[in-house]
Amino acid sequence: MKRNKDFKRIEQNLKLPKDYKSNPNIAHSYQASDRFDFVFWFGDLNYRINGTLKVIKKLIHDNRIEVMLFNDQLF
């Protein structure tokens, strides 16, 4: 959750000029992911869930996303 919020906050706060001509159809957007064909994000964006591989696979199989989110290291 925190990782997603951080990503959205960073992308929304990037100060890109509105008139940048990367794509005239979406030049109104401030978000880099909307305005460019390729955007490279650097940083630790990997999710880490506390638990064993066996438990995590079972949670995925059972579609228990809420349990995995609760055990996300950055939750």
Image (cartoon, rainbow, N blue to C red):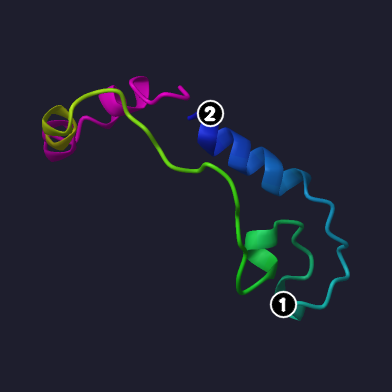
Q: Quadrant of residue 8?
A: top right
Q: Is residue 48 above or below residue 21?
A: above
10 Å crowding of disc 1: few (<14), some (14-19), many (20+):
few
Q: Is residue 49 above or below residue 9?
A: above
Which mark, residue 67?
none
Q: Quadrant of residue 65?
A: top left
Q: Are marks 2 and 1 in contact (CB under 8 Å)?
A: no
Q: Quadrant of residue 70?
A: top left
In the image, residue 72 lies in the stretch drawn in magenta: yes
- Residue 63 location in percent, x, y? 18, 36
* Left or right, residue 54 beside residue 50: left
- Kindly state the secondary structure of the residue where label 1 is placed: helix
The magenta segment? 58-75
Residue occupying the point 30% across, 23% down: 50
- Kindly state the secondary structure of the residue where label 2 is placed: helix
Q: Is residue 5 above or below residue 28?
A: above
- Residue 25 location in percent, x, y? 72, 77
Q: Disc 1 residue type? A: Asn
Residue position for label 1: 25
Q: CA distance from mark 2 to mark 1?
A: 32 Å
Residue position for label 2: 2
Residue occupying the point 82% across, 78% down: 21
